[in-house]
Amino acid sequence: MQKRTPFREILADTPIIAAVKDMEGLDSCLDSDIQVIFILFGDVCSLQEIVKKVKDAGKIAMVHMDLVSGFTGKEIVLDYIKNFTHADGIITTKINLIKYAKQIGLYTVLRYFVVDSMALSNIEKQVDQIQPDVIEILPGIMPNIIKKVNKISKVPVIAGGLIADKKDVMTALKNGAVAISATSPDVWFM
């Protein structure tokens, strides 16, 4: 079996991630230089076709487990994603899915909504034990929070949510994010 490039290295080469929420956005970002695509839509019947489009374009397909209709938080869904859609990895807020996804060789993004000090405490308690490839914090426009998360965890940080322009991207990267995810085509084609 061929050894895969660590996800962190892929993000270092292309730190802007297209987070797509519909087919129109997917079709648009396939023409960009972006290498990683977060799939934030679809259902159990359409996911295979969506992932195929991403893979046919030579890009990394990351499926947001919590946003695909028809999926449960069960590990068997990860087997389906790996074996039938051939996605490269998952995004989720569920710790148990991260553990199993790593076991079966999927890239992993553990997503946190950092809305209060309890969320920061959860990151500190959970992330270094679970060791996802990266964590994504939302909203991503909080430079001080990016710095704090980098201090409490050794896992690289993606800033996502509300990233709207070059200034937001540069601020997140300058403050310690290894990459940003955005739903805005303006950011994808900067």
Image (cartoon, rainbow, N blue to C red):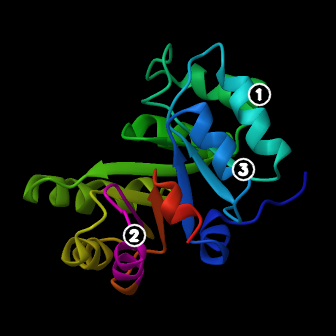
The answer to whether residue 165 is above or below residue 38 is below
- Judge by depth and name the residue closer to the eye, 150 or 105: 150
In the image, 156: left or right of 190? left
What distance separates the C-alpha of mark 3 from that of mark 2?
A: 20 Å
The answer to whether residue 16 is above or below residue 91 is below
Q: Of the residues shown, which amino acid type is indicated by label 1? A: Asn
The answer to whether residue 102 is above or below residue 190 is above
Tell which tag, 1 or 3, sits nearer the viewer.
3
Q: Outermost residue toward the left?
A: 117
Task: Work out whether mark 3 precedes mark 2 in sequence or the reverse, and give the earlier one.
Answer: 3
Quarter assignment of residue 164: bottom left
Asked whether residue 43 is drawn in magenta, I would say: no
Residue at image location 43% in from the left, 23% down from the top: 73
Q: Of the residues shown, which amino acid type is indicated by label 2? A: Asp
Label 1 with label 3: CB-CB less than 8 Å: no
Considering the numbered disc 2 on the image, is that residue within a helix, a strand or a loop? loop
What distance separates the C-alpha of mark 2 from that of mark 1?
A: 37 Å
Q: Of the residues shown, which amino acid type is indicated by label 3? A: Leu
Residue 181 on image: x %, y %? 47, 58
Q: Which residue position holds label 1?
A: 83
Q: Which residue position holds label 2?
A: 165
Residue 146 on image: x %, y %? 28, 73
Tell which tag, 2 or 1, sits nearer the viewer.
2
Task: Work out whether mark 2 precedes mark 1 in sequence or the reverse, and give the earlier one.
Answer: 1
Residue 32 on image: x %, y %? 69, 60
What segment carries the magenta color? Answer: 158-173
Quarter assignment of residue 45: top right
**Mark linked to residue 30:** 3
